[in-house]
Amino acid sequence: MFRRLLVVLVRTLLKPVMRILFRVRIEGTFDAMQAERLIIIANHESYLDGLLLGLFLPVKPVFVVHTLIARQPMFRAMLWLTDYLTVDPMHPMAVKQILALVKSGRPVVIFPEGRITVTGGLMKVYEGPAFVAARTGATLVPVRLDGPARSTFARLSGEARRQWFPQIRLSILPPTQLPMPEGATAKERRRRAGEAMRHIMQEMMFQSHKRRTLFEALVDAGDIHGWKTPIVEDVNQTPYTYRQVLKMALAAGRFLAREGEDGEHVGVLLPNLAITAGAIIGASAFGRIPAVLNPTAGADALRNALTAAQVGRVLTSRAFIDKANLQATLAALPEVKFLYLEDLRPSLRLKDKLWVLAASLWPARYVPSGNVESPAVVLFTSGSEGKPKGVVLSHRALVANVAQIRAIIDLNRRDRIFNALPMFHSFGLTAGTLYPLIAGVPVFLYVSPLHYRVIPEIVYDRNCTALFGTGTFLAHYGRFAHPYDFFRLRYVVAGAEKLNENVRTLWFEKFGVRIYEGYGATETAPVLAVNTPMAYRAGTVGQILPGIEHRLVPVPGIERGGQLQVRGPNVMSGYLRSDAPGVLEPPVTELGEGWYDTGDVVSIDADGFVRIEGRVKRFAKIAGEMISLEVVERMAQAANPTAQHAATSRPDAARGEALILFTTDRQLTRETLLGAAQQLHLPELAVPRIIRVVDELPMLPTGKVDYLTLKARASTEAPA
């Protein structure tokens, strides 16, 4: 009796103290916590988690605690304030104990990870809690704990910044249930239940992210990780802190805002540098929408982009123009006013410098909050199969895609990302630049992905642990790198094009590194799916990210899979086309507004892994049968993995269309391809009758094959 009174007294006194010290904020409602059978699931960030949930939840739950955690002195000191059940997840009776507890009607709190995170992200999710939820039909209420991982009560290792009293946020997500999955055996049902629980946890991590602008996300990251923390390094070999990046953004934004009007599109023609990232974020903070241009596209493509987005001013650099030999390109665009970075600092008056200094110390006072639905950036499609289009991405889309990546990948302050993908490439902008800035992961920005001998050396010298690239770029890095250059890498993510099996094998055998293939589109900011250490299946592009709805629309003539259409917070606001300058064309399909048609034919297996079957535009109708051009390329790759191959088609009077294979293999014959087709169990119709040998395939600056050029070349050749 005395103990109960003491517990009530301590809890009554402790709750306001904790609320004041940690500025505890609760988001969401408690309505679902009156369910008859209730399981509250939460991520596990620190030794404070149980105490926080026990004090601020409206129910008095029983905590299910891992036996090893319960033995920790710090944790044990807090357990006497709550009711708890210690279990060993490896013990066969553990699940039965939890089942009995849930069926008794007491609210139960479970940490599905079973241990406190040491990465800042989700750890492995155990199958036991998921099986209990499925078996009992209990109501699941996910609660996201955000902040305890930054406290001194956490277990983050490395260079993580610790605070005595960080702000803590408890986000209560809408209730859900976990039906018992289908499976031939109990073991299979448990596994699938565990996978379903992992998806719920990842969805929780994403749905609880803060909706904000890019500038606000940068400011929040500086507050969390420390303004003096180095976050970006580039070829100048000077690490820039959060404060310095913020000053770059403020100075560039003020510089661009002197002329033009709010909502104006301003071109950005710069290489991968810290100032480029600052200029993109700063421009959008001051109501100027950066249209990031491809310097290798040529005058015609640049004019097309400038027309589509109605760009009248372009921010660039004289030094960059000289090094990239862009004088002729700029001279061909006399209608554009060019602003130069070299003029930025001299143009800042004393009043401007004092303003930048004050705004860098108190950004919320000097830069008003923006609208997350307003445009943040305009990127341009690669134009591999048609005229490039401007893709308008809002703050909501970019920040959401960063949050989706963070929900499934555990990179943190101990890591260092190497990014040579240019910022005019959506993969390079979001995953390679914005993600590390917002997530607090140090990043090295390099000016070109084409320096195949230099890049492995920099990755080695800077102890990089993550590398993003296209399959083509990774193939070249793998070929030129020393076997020890990539000894620190733990994340190598390939996207933007199909990853050849020989590249995957090369990296695994030469470096012992697994490549995680992903998939996305500029229109989705860009990441839609990616393999991870927790969910990996070779030959696929991983599972769809949390927060994304998807549908497969049947395609006549194609039996396997369907055309992928998606909807989610990371989907673009719309297109800008050169034939309708400045007119925003929102995404829409037969499913309704907000849905984006990827144009890709994919199949999704029972575990949710996505396999790309090909693009709708990259199918040929041969004698009435639909043949994927990617399958043709896969066949050629099997025949000679060391050569480059690309397939296209052209009209054919007798068969509808004819397949044409462009290859760098001078010895490749149709007979060799027939043998490869038999090994892969492909029909003879998929074997091209026309083989054209080239010295090298035409490539786009993004690393993709230029199929538009190949298509034109095929159509102009005389029939075989």
Image (tube, rainbow, N blue to C red):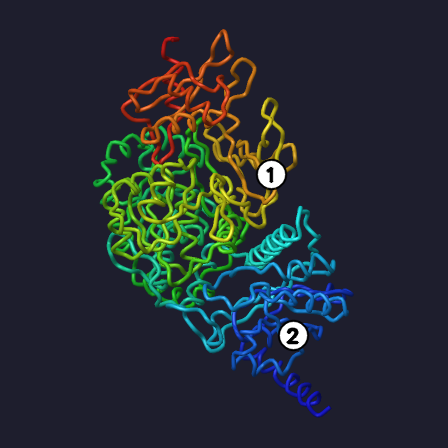
Q: Can residue 257 be seen in this view?
A: no
Image x and y of residue 244, in percent: 33, 62
Q: In this view, does 641 lie above or below 413?
A: above
Q: Residue 234 carries which label?
A: none
Left/right placement of residue 358 relative to residue 37 reads: left
Q: How many labels does the image show?
A: 2
Image x and y of residue 207, in percent: 59, 56
From the viewer's side, name the closer residue of 256 and 102: 102
Q: Mark 2: which secondary structure?
A: strand
Residue drawn where x is 70% and y is 75% of the image: 60
In the figure, residue 463 lies in which quadrant? bottom left
Q: Can residue 514 be seen in this view?
A: yes
In the figure, residue 607 lies in which quadrant? top right
Mark 1 nearby-residue class (10 Å; few <14, some 14–19, many ≥20) = many
Residue that numbered label 1 is attached to: 595
Q: Mark 1: which secondary structure?
A: loop
Image x and y of residue 344, in percent: 29, 52
Residue that numbered label 2 is attached to: 85
User: The C terminus is located in which quarter?
Assistant: top left
Instruction: Name which residue type carries label 2.
Output: Leu
From the viewer's side, name the closer residue of 40 and 25: 40
Residue located farthest toward the bottom when viewing the structure as drawn: 2
Left/right placement of residue 241 relative to residue 121 reads: left
Instruction: Name which residue type carries label 1.
Output: Trp
Residue drawn where x is 62% and y is 69% of the image: 26
From the viewer's side, name the closer residue of 16 and 476: 476
Residue drawn where x is 58% and y is 65% of the image: 90
